[in-house]
Image (cartoon, grey):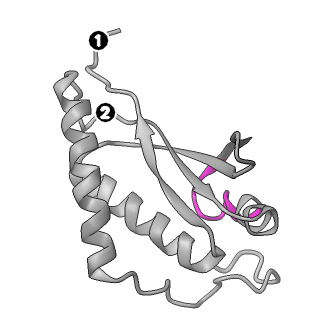
Amino acid sequence: GNRRGNKGGGEGRPPPEVSPARREEEWAGDKDVLAGVREKGDRPEIVRAVDVSFRGTEPALDRLEEDAEELGFEVIEREEDEEGEVSLFLGREQTSDDDAIRALTLKCLQIELIYDVEYDGWGCTAEDGAE
């Protein structure tokens, strides 16, 4: 992208390498989630809202929130749990087929490395096409 290059962000730099082991580990979990969604009659080709969450320090989450739109996400909310751990929820519209979810997960694992946050997974509703 040649938009605002003044952020000192990832403009022009290749995304960081995510280790194959880390990708496989996430995919193993994703497959379980997808199996559950599909059991509910999900049609993967239907575009729906998918949300992802990241945990981290306030400054790290601030940076991620600032860049969310550039990364293709919209900011949903920030939530603090009982232990005071803060999570940032981001969303985007996409399908739930294997390739789309693999791509989403890879992007989130890259975000983890770039922004020094912890990727906490994704979620979506099952869409069966019925109104």
Say whether residue 15 is left or right of residue 80: left
Q: Which residue is mark 2?
A: 46
Span shown in magenta: 66-74
The amino acid pointed to by label 2 is Ile
Q: Which mark is residue 130?
A: 1
Label 2 or label 1, whichever comes before in sequence order: 2
Residue at 63%, 75% in the rendered image: 116
Where on the picture, by quarter, is residue 76?
top right
Q: Where residue 7 sits: x, y (%)?
A: 80, 80
For the stretch drawn in magenta, the main secondary structure is: loop
**Is 37 drawn above or below residue 73 in the view shown?**
above
Please state which of residues 24 and 91 is positioned toward the viewer in this rendering. 24
The amino acid pointed to by label 1 is Ala
Element type at mark 1: loop
Whether residue 91 is visible: yes
Q: Is residue 69 magenta?
A: yes
Residue at 55%, 71% in the rendered image: 112
Q: Is residue 123 magenta?
A: no
Q: Where residue 113 sits: x, y (%)?
A: 55, 78
Whether residue 78 is visible: no
Residue at 18%, 38% in the rendered image: 35
Q: CA distance from mark 2 to mark 1?
A: 11 Å
